[in-house]
Amino acid sequence: MAIVAGVDFGTLSVRVTLLDSERGRLSTASAEYPLKRKREDPDYATQSHAVQMDALVKAMRKAVADAGIGGDAVGAIALDTTGSSVIPVGANLEPLDDYYLWCDHRAKVEAQQITELAHREKLEAIEWCGGVYSHEWGFAKLLHWLRHNPEKRGRFVTAFEHCDMVAGTLAGISDASKVKRSVCAMGHKWLWNPKWDGLPPQQFLSKLDPLFDGIRDKLAGEYLTSDKIAGHLSPQWAEKMGLKAGIPIPVGAFDAHWDAIGAGCREGDVVNVVGTSTCIIAMEKKTTLVPGVCGVVPGSVHPQYAGVEAGLSATGDIFEAIARRAGTRVSELSKGLEQYRAGQTGLLRLSWDNGDRTVLVNSELGGVTLGWNLIHTAEDELFAAIEGTAFHTRIILERMAEFEVPVERVINAGGIPQNNKVLNQVYANVLGKPVLVPAGIPTSLGSGIFALLAAGAFPTIEAAQDAMCLKYATYDPDPAAVGVYDRLFGLYREVYFALGRENADAAPLGRVLPELKRIAAEVCGL
């Protein structure tokens, strides 16, 4: 028997779950921390490392107390984080600034420069991340920081992803070169792959900007999958959290990737981790490059498989924005949506309010809603937004299937599907497949599974999943709704590519609005 702690650092809070290898979940506790925004700069989004670590201490102590155990009973701790969330550090792992959080979008120019140079230089790495480097990713954020903080450059030693910084901190490591780096984080966001000896060549990075001279050496170290150990809990942090010093800390990963493991992901499954944004995770034995996805990385989700990541830049954030503009909450605005039928609103809404992460990878796009009339309501827009995020998800899954990534089973994980039956049913109808939803919140369950592996409680990830993962509620597609959504998806796909690509071929969009009206009239029996 083993008791372990699984930790999940989200956008606004950290969640700690204590798992018993025989009894399952013992307790879950969370603690919040602020997201720093600037009204004058909507692309700005940062968080304090120190404040996050304080929140971890609070959540850990509460989880241990709620479980009614002694902290010395905890045999391992594993953690996942948002990403790409980048922190520049100096000597002794001193943070030189706050984290550039995953949703910080200031590095748009840097990302465009990386993409353009990579294609000019025929850098193979760019093809492994869908052909476009994102402003949400590590090299772009680090270059932006170096360009805008000249007074701190002299103290700069290296930069870490959030998951690696926290693991190194908890292990009491002060030498940056000794901090283990996550294959998941560095592969998906930093162009790392063992196929070309890790990171891109220094010649390429220096050509991008002389500020990157020597950066490859500064980012050197061991790059490991999450079945390996990052370190052991230091006496200092053990005392703060009330745990036993010396327990193993496996190499961390991104939250969505471990959420997929916690949701029971196997080869052939696609897991939609639906929260403020959506991360779409799959894994495959055969490594297949897919244009427009966020990355294909061997060992990123499961050490024995290539992980495939895609997603939407905003999902729950869109729902919240609609409710906020209406002066209410999403929970209130959602009342009655279960009575809505496919296509009845006559609205077609594209989910570009925070840009497009996949498959266009275009941060310059904005939200679009077609079909408004004078009596539409905020409830209508919310339902159309749910439909729109489902259509966008279908665009992504069809792209993955086109390039032979197996898409046999769809699992909706993350926080929103637990509380939104309408969303799950719409997704089933739009995708034309049963949608499985864990019967409980799987967040931090994936990190608990890797902690159990580190503690030696299970021999494989699959064995731990069989013991720990939750059962599913199943949402079956409604044949009538599937037919309506197939028609609407044809319109959505046409608009998506016609408006979303700067050099798109001419498309007959004049038929879209009349067809939306026809579909709504048919559905409503008019």
Image (tube, rainbow, N blue to C red):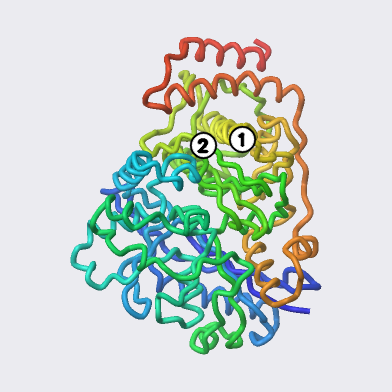
Q: Are marks 2 and 1 in contact (CB under 8 Å)?
A: yes
* In the image, residue 360 above or below residue 446: above
Mark 2 to mark 1 CA distance (whole Å): 9 Å
| Residue at image coords 64%, 69% | 17
- Quadrant in the picture for the N terminus: bottom right
Q: Position of residue 333 (x, y in %)?
A: 56, 39
> Which residue is denoted by mark 1 in the rendering?
403
Q: Does residue 7 sit above or below 320 in this rendering?
A: below
Question: What residue sits right under mark 2 in the picture?
Answer: 291
> Taking the image as drawn, is residue 475 in sight?
yes
The first of marks 2 and 1 along the sequence is 2
* Residue 268, position as x, y percentages in the image: 72, 44
Q: Which residue is the extreme one toward the left? A: 151
Circle 2: element type: loop
Task: Please give left or right for residue 76 compared with residue 37 in the image.
Answer: right
Q: What residue sits 34% from the left and 71% below the top?
A: 89
Q: Can see residue 379? A: no
Total marks placed: 2
Q: Which quarter of the rendered picture does the C terminus lie within?
A: top right
